Image: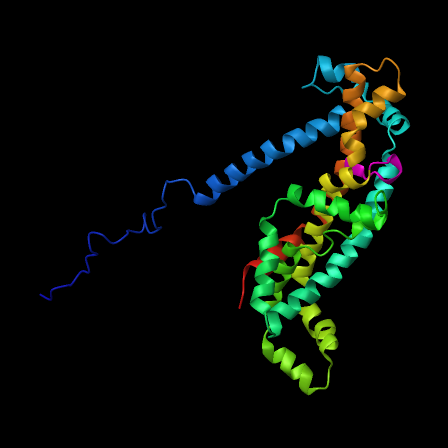
Amino acid sequence: MTATLIDVPPADAPTAATNEPRRSRRPHPAIASQTFLIVLLVAFLAPVAWALLSAFKPANDIITSPLTFDPSRFTLDNYIAMFQDVPIASGFANTAVVLVLKGAITMFFAPLAAYAFAKYSFVGKNVIFGTVLVTLMLPTIVLIIPLLLEMKQLGWVNTYQALILPGSVDAFAIFWMRQVIAAVPDELLDAARVDGCGEFGIFWRVVLPVIRPGLAGLAVLTIMNIYNDFVWPVVIASSDRMATLQVVLSTLAQNITGNRIGADYATVTGELLAASSVALIPLLVLFIALQRHFINGILAGSVKG
């Protein structure tokens, strides 16, 4: 008789019925993190959604039933009354002028200064850059009085010059762009010099195309800072003619009660929500449209080399 050898699988080998690897019953980490992010999203967006919806409710309903919204009672009365009582159009116009001019100055001169600090060697470079960084630690309130006296001596109080020029090239913008430009390879600059390109041409034709993500991130931050700036405009622009949007919003309740005799708390609240919604929409649209560039810009400015 011939013995037949039978291969017996090891005890720990999977059989045909259980040939699939065992799956862990623990919750996937991505599910937990996504759930946490969704909770945070709801927590942050709930007040914004409430303000936007409440602006379309009758003024009395905002006070009596703040947490409900009846589509059948949808109204534009708060917006109509707000545009009649508050000079929000002039506030938007002044903010737009300051935003365009001050933003253009920041986006042009801050990268130039950062390029010098990142790619050139000169006497006192570290001392000057350290001084620039020190100004980041100075609170704005410390600079208000000296700047106000300077603007008074120049005769710039209640002018666009005073709203635009102070702080147009700030230390943060220079620091941000220096970190981005420092990551540009020196070989690119040397190759451009060999080809006969001038120093400004190197910056304009070589450096700027490479640092576009960082510029996009700086642009978003600059727009948000100028749009939301309140302390300096409320000090230097005391007249209604030069008031920016944030200054107009700060005096909105006074304007409503002053222009409408007998305006009650519900009326003021409704118009306040309408004005806040109008002021909030541009920033929401901006961030939604440029969020990809903003994130790429943050990553470009946080990594060197």
Give the residue at x 65% y 65%.
Answer: 114
The region drawn magenta spans 238-246
As displayed, is residue 168 above or below residue 129? above
Work out whether residue 134 can be spotted. Answer: yes
- Give the tally of numbered discs: 0
Residue at horizontal 79 percent and vertical 48 percent from the top: 151
Question: What colour scheme was applied to this rendering of the protein?
Answer: rainbow
Residue 174: x %, y % from top left: 65, 60
Asked if residue 236 lies in the magenta stretch, the reply is no
Verify whether residue 239 appears in magenta.
Answer: yes
Q: Is residue 163 visible?
A: no
Front residue of 69 and 161: 161
Residue sitting at 86 percent across and 13 percent down?
262
Name the one closer to the observer, 291 or 230: 230
State left or right for residue 21 relative to residue 8: right
- Quadrant of the rendered image containing residue 118: bottom right
Depth check, front residue: 216 or 240:
240
Q: Using residue 248 as the reference point, say whether residue 114 is left or right of it.
A: left
Position of 148 relative to 198 (above/below): above
Name, please, the residue furthest toward the left: 1
Residue 219, position in %: x, y?
A: 71, 55
Q: Nearer the viewer, residue 10 or 290?
A: 290
